Image (spheres, rainbow, N blue to C red):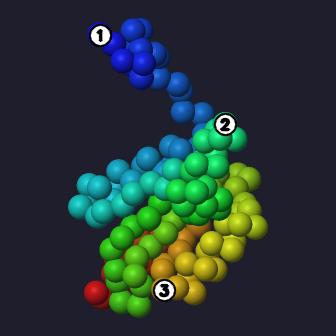
Amino acid sequence: MIGHWQSKVAKKPRKMDRPEQVLQIKCVTWLKKRGYSCYKIHNEGRRTPYMAKILRDMGLSPGILDLAIPIPRKDYHGAYIEFKDGSNGTLSDTQKWWCEELKKNGYYVAVIKTYEEFLEAMSYYFDLPL
């Protein structure tokens, strides 16, 4: 018996058309290959008003950054990364607020538009002493 969450017909994967997604996958792959823990904060997508309310009540917060790295270094409790499309990615006001809030509370924050920027940020962060 097939449950309501399962499809009888396999769906063709959608082509990833967002450079931000491609960049994030490449960066997460880099972290995982080196044994660093990280997790995606799923904060995008369309929802019904009912589901949006439930998720907000559960702690979903607009503007929270894309990726968390729960590994402390020197003066930082961990790191948060926001990925932006290099051609037109800008932070929203709520993302700017989160960046400042996280920094104020002892987290390293990086806004990444290219893979090279990611490598630079991670080189800096992981070269810090524990």
Give the secondary structure at mark 2.
loop
**Occupied quadrant, residue 7:** top left
Question: Mark 1, mark 3: which one is toward the viewer?
Answer: 1
Residue 97 position within the rendered picture, expressed as x and y whole percent measured from the top left: 68, 74
In the figure, 109 relative to 92: above or below? below
Question: Please, what is the three-letter code of the amino acid marked with disc 3?
Answer: Gly
Nearer to the camera, 97 or 52: 52
Question: Please, what is the three-letter code of the amino acid marked with disc 1?
Answer: Met
Q: Which mark is residue 1?
A: 1
Residue 95 position within the rendered picture, expressed as x and y whole percent measured from the top left: 67, 66
Work out whether residue 115 can be spotted. no
Residue 58 position within the rendered picture, expressed as x and y whole percent measured from the top left: 52, 56
Q: Is residue 51 left or right of residue 75?
A: right
Q: Which residue is mark 2?
A: 48
Q: CA distance from mark 1 to mark 2?
A: 28 Å
Mark 2 closeness class: few <14, some 14–19, many ≥20 residues within 10 Å: few
Work out whether residue 2 can be spotted. yes
Q: Earlier in the sequence, mark 3 or mark 2?
A: 2
**Occupied quadrant, residue 8:** top left
Residue at 42 percent across and 18 percent down: it is 4
Residue at 33 percent across and 13 percent down: it is 2
Give the secondary structure at mark 1.
loop
Question: Mark 3, mark 2: which one is toward the viewer?
Answer: 2
Q: Which residue is mark 3?
A: 106
Q: CA distance from mark 3 to mark 2?
A: 35 Å
Give the secondary structure at mark 3.
loop
Q: Earlier in the sequence, mark 1 or mark 2?
A: 1
Residue 36 position within the rendered picture, expressed as x and y whole percent measured from the top left: 29, 64
**Occupied quadrant, residue 74:** bottom left
